[in-house]
Image: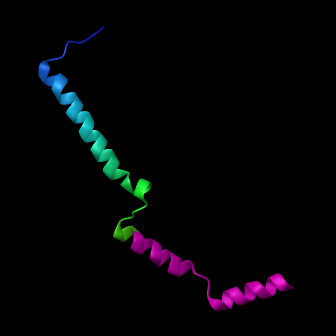
Amino acid sequence: MSRQRTPDEGFDWPSTKARIGQLLRAHYQTYTTEELPPRLLALIKKLDEETEPSAEQVQVTRERLED
């Protein structure tokens, strides 16, 4: 069952499809270029600093491994 399209609908769909593609590429650019927004980079840095083991923790771990 085919639906008849107006000339405008035939013209609008390719431009709409192209626009959707542009928006999706922009949205997922982070995953393809590995560029992260500054706020996310700051959050990751903060998390790394909070979870970074201290020199004392590293020494205790080494001593346990040697025993």
Q: Is residue 17 magenta?
A: no
Q: Which residue is drawn at 18% across and 16% down?
A: 5
The residue positioned farthest toward the right in the image shown = 67
Q: Does the magenta stretch include residue 53?
A: yes
Residue 24: percent from left, percent from top:
33, 45
Q: Give the image quarter of residue 36.
A: bottom left
Position of 32 relative to 4 (above/below): below
Q: Nearer the viewer, residue 24 or 40?
A: 24
Residue 56: percent from left, percent from top:
67, 91
Left or right for 52, reference 44 = right
Left or right for 5, reference 56 = left
Left or right for 58, reference 24 = right
Q: Give the image quarter of residue 6.
A: top left
Q: Which residue is drawn at 34% across and 51% down?
A: 27
Magenta highlight range: 41-67
Residue 21: percent from left, percent from top:
30, 41
Residue 10: percent from left, percent from top:
18, 22
The residue positioned farthest toward the top in the image shown = 1
From the image, which quarter does the C terminus lie in?
A: bottom right
Q: Which residue is drawn at 30% across and 8% down?
A: 1
Q: Residue at x 22, y 35 (%)?
A: 16
* Majority secondary structure in the magenta region: helix
Left or right for 20, reference 9 = right
